[in-house]
Structure formats: C-alpha cells, structure tokens
Amino acid sequence: MDLAGKVAVVTGGASGIGLAAAKAYLAKGAKVVIADFNEEGGKQETENLKSHGEVEFFKVDVSSEEAVENMIKFAIDTFGTVDILVNNAGIGVQGETHDLSYEDYHKTIAVNQDSVFFGSKHAVRHMMNHGGGVVINTASILGSVGEGSAFAYNASKGAVNLMTKSLALQYADKNIRVNAVAPGYVESGMVSRDALGPEFYDQLVSKHPIGRLGQPEEIAHAIIFLSENDFMTGTTILVDGGYTAQ
C-alpha cells in the first residue's frame, strides 16, 4: 500500500508509540486523526504537526463503543474515509492478583481489549464498502509471555493477539488486512530512569538482550511496515530487543 493520501486513525496518539506512528504516517504523506483521551496534550501535539501534513485531533474514550464509533465518523467526515486504523491506546495495572479490584481489572480489559473490538468493528464496516483497508493493533510482549504482577494486562494483550488472527481470517477476502505489533518495554514519560528509579529501570533493561529499551520510533517503523506490506495479515510482529527469544 502506498500511504500517500491515505487516512490513518491512531488511538493513544497524543504520546509515545501513538504519536511516533502519527508522525511516521504524516512523513509518508498520509492524513492522520490523532485520537486520545488526553485532550490538552493531543491538541497541542496536533498543532505542532500541522506544518507536516493534514492532521486533526479527536478526543475519545476507547472503552466506550459510542465514542469509538464517533471517532470513525469524525475521520470520515473530516477526510472522506478511513484506510488505516491503529488500535494503540492502552493502560497497565501492576500488583498482586489477589489484591486486584474488579474495577481495575475491568478497566484494563475495557481500554486494552474492548477498544480493539469497538475500533475494528466500526472501521471494518466502513472499509468493507470502500475497497478494503488495514487494522493494526498494539499488542505486547506480555501477550506472549507471562508477567506475575500483570494479570489483567497479560489477559488483555493475549486476547489482542488472537483477536488479530480472527479478524484477519474473517476479512481477508474483503481486502482488509489485520496485524499487530508487540513491543518490548519502550522509553516514555512513565518508562524512564527518572520515572522508575535507576534500580528498577536497569532491571527492565537487563531483560532485553539488545541491552536497552526500545524507542517509540522503532515501534512506529514496524507499524508503517505492516501498513505498506500487502501480503501480511494475521501476524503479530515482536519488536522487543530479544526479550521473548529467551
């Protein structure tokens, strides 16, 4: 797929991997809707990117089907179509499972897993009638391997892997490709030496044979690859510095 002129919607687009993906799409000549619950940050980043291409912001709670449906409608009303949806928004909860509240568990499932259903459902409805499209889900290394303190996150990201395969099989004959990218730990505002403290940060680094954490742009590069390669569907690409090779 040539991305020039295509329309991409990126959830969780105000920061981190989502923002890096939005920038990468713009660099390829695509039009972008940055969708995020963080309205202030999202609007600011959108304004910063106006000189790089056609980009608009939409505030969305991805755990709400109505809000996600409105997001897709906004993209269609603004740019005429939706060619690419990146279901990237996500949250994590750390702690002992026996102390995990149902509210925290359900919120993680709603944001990480339900959002993939909502986004894919409403994007696919449009894509089926407009020649096809691409859905890319942000999974995680913790969708492939367990982490003792991340029960809800493991559950949600493991589900994303199989949702990706199911959607890919169901809509392949409609020219709709569905793939996922599974990052290792990635440098961000919340995942940094300053935020985590040197000891915990170094522990995370030590789990990656490549000797460092990932950068958002490296994950965005994989997202662009999955967008452009027309022979890939039903695949989860691990971009994890060797984390899951061990």
Image: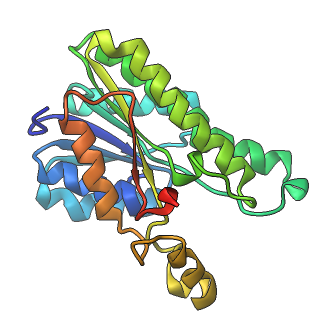
Image spot of residue 42 (x, y percent)? 39, 58
Which corner quadrant holds the N terminus?
top left
Image spot of residue 86 (x, y percent)? 37, 40
Q: Which residue sits furthest front?
A: 246
Q: Residue at x 23, y 46 (%)?
A: 224
Above/below status of 207 relative to 244: below
Closer to us: 193 or 142: 142
Q: Residue at x 54, y 71 (%)?
A: 207
Q: Residue at x 17, y 51 (%)?
A: 26
Instruction: Tell me: 231 left or right of 96.
Output: left
Closer to us: 31 or 50: 31
Number of disc labels: 0
Instruction: Tell me: 36 left or right of 221.
Output: right
Image spot of residue 190 (x, y percent)? 54, 73
Instruction: Tell me: 49 left or right of 157.
Output: left
Above/below status of 175 relative to 139: above
Using the rendered image of the protein, determine whether residue 2 is visible from the camera's viewpoint.
yes
